[in-house]
Image (spheres, rainbow, N blue to C red):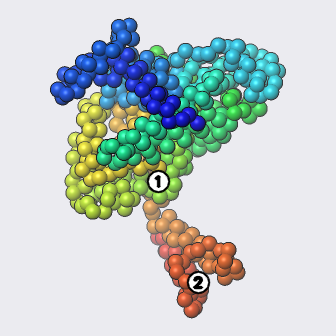
Amino acid sequence: MPGAASSVFRLISAAWVLVRHDALIPREVEPALPPSLRTLGRIVRVFSGREARKGRPGQRLARAFEALGPAAIKIGQLLSTRADVFGLEFADDLGHLKDRLPPFPLDQARASVELALGRSVESLFVSFEPAVSAASLAQAHPAVLRDGRKVAVKVLRPGVERRVATDLAAMRLAAGLAYRVSREARRLETIAFTETVARSLELELDLRLEASACSELGEVMAEDGYMSAPAVVWEGVAKRVMVTEWIKGSPLSSSDTLAQPGFDRHALADNMVRAFLTQALDHGVFHADLHEGNLFAAPPDKLYAVDFGIVGRLGARERRFLAEILWGFLQRDYQRVAQVHFDAGYVPARHSVEAFAQALRAVGEPVAGRKAADVSMGRLLGLLFEITAVFDMHLRPELVLLQKTMASVEGVARRIDADHDIWSAAKPVVERWIARELSPIAQARRLADQGTRIIDGLARWAESPASAPVILEGPPAAGGLWTGLALGLSVGALAIALLALTRAH
């Protein structure tokens, strides 16, 4: 683990790299800045390098992120999905960070495969070709197995673990400093946010976990068909190497892909949104790194995902809140959306539900029924940020991956189809979830399950009070066991009666 001194040095080095590339306070944004920042920008640009500061802001920032390494490249990948916020040119300039970084040599990749799998490359593959894509943590090589199947071999970059550890130590230091000195940083929970990002990056460095996630999400995706995942070749899986069957389609990161004949852009964008929502709502597990570099497409509307290093998970409670919030916006029922936020604890109880509903109306109404191309996402996000500040809303660490992925998914959908309506795409998935999970039958089932758990817990308590889980607070009063048992039976009986009633109708 890098020490504090090395983390401070890393932060200073990162700032210096941004300064040298004129990417810290770019000259192009100077007219929009307040006088104090304009002055600071001019001072900072004295130290920028003549060669490094050439090009557009996005090109300079991409070069700076590439020099800074994996953590910065991840930020660049996210920014590149939001052409609607930062502009198409800026997003395209950052686009090569997705899968077009310089690869490491083929002989190093072969050596890594042999070391990880404990056998020669020739014993596994008929052919093993140079990398076709290279990202911040790993690169992918086409290969052919001895049985004739074409596969992709993912290999971690040499020394990437040490570099990620250095980056994360610096990020933690920066987050801690910001948390101490800035009230806004405390509201945005910079420490918890950094820990969430750090954990996801650390998990990405074990390709055995990615293979498991690829297999799990492949099964989830197959249920609805909006997106597909490659099959894992388990004999080719180790900590630093992963082999999967070759994916169909062309990379979405290539500008030529959607120019091919036969694509239904509207349906493809719909599938993008629906794939993510079905994963998150129906299954509580979702691919949390859905940028164009990890997506392939085939006519007319087929989507294929790769790179399952970051996976998000949602509990039943979070899934219900997400569905109800989306449903409320679809119905333009801002009072309901506001109430769900208060029920979930996202907005402090000291505020007014009605006032928050009014603020949400200011967000929802300007975009209702309008084409995506006619909506300024930069302005909308600015308004959302102001509202969260007014109502003292803190960032929710457990929802960081969800929010990040939602931003990426919407950005990719808009890149596919400039007029895409994310709400229309989401509606059938959310409607289905609401009908299934919030129907009287579903609520009766949950009530019955709760009654069963109470009865089971009380029975275990009766058999062994010391070891059974605590299900009632405080010491048991005389007859408390029988009272609790009667309560459990009553809840169960009521649930069964409700279930029978709903089925009868």
- Determine the residue positioned at 67% across, 74% down: 467
Q: Nearer the viewer, residue 82 or 64?
A: 64
Neighbor class of circle 1 (other Cα within 10 Å; few <14, some 14-19, many 20+) is some
Q: Quadrant of residue 344?
A: bottom left
Q: Residue furthest left?
A: 35
458 on left or right of 71: right
Binning the other alpha carbons within 10 Å of mark 2 as few (below 14), some (14 to 19) or many (20 upward) gives some
Query: Relative to residue 349, is residue 59 depicted above or below?
Result: above
Name the amino acid, label 1.
Answer: Arg
Image location (x, y in percent) of residue 368: 26, 42
Farthest top residue in view: 51
Residue 157 versus residue 1 in the image, above or below? above
Disc tally is 2
Quadrant in which the N terminus appears: top right
Q: Position of residue 305 (x, y in %)?
A: 55, 31
Instruction: Please give the name of the residue rendered at 31% of the width and 30% of the height, measured from the top-left corner.
Output: 85
| Disc 1 secondary structure class | helix
Which quadrant would residue 381 be assigned to in this image?
Answer: top left
Relative to 395, does residue 495 appear above or below in the rendering?
below
Q: Residue furthest front?
A: 5
Instruction: Determine the residue positioned at 45% across, 63% down.
Output: 439
Q: Which residue does the image show at 51% across and 71% down from the upper left?
A: 447
The residue that mark 2 highlights is 485
Residue type beneath disc 2: Leu
Which of the two discs, 1 and 2, labels the residue nearer the N terminus? 1
* Label 2 element class: helix
> Along the line of sight, which residue is nearer the eye, 393 or 318?
393
Task: Give how far apart the Cα atoms at labels 1 and 2 are.
Answer: 31 Å
- State whether residue 361 appears in this view: no
Pick the residue in front: 395 or 336.
395
Residue marked by disc 1: 319
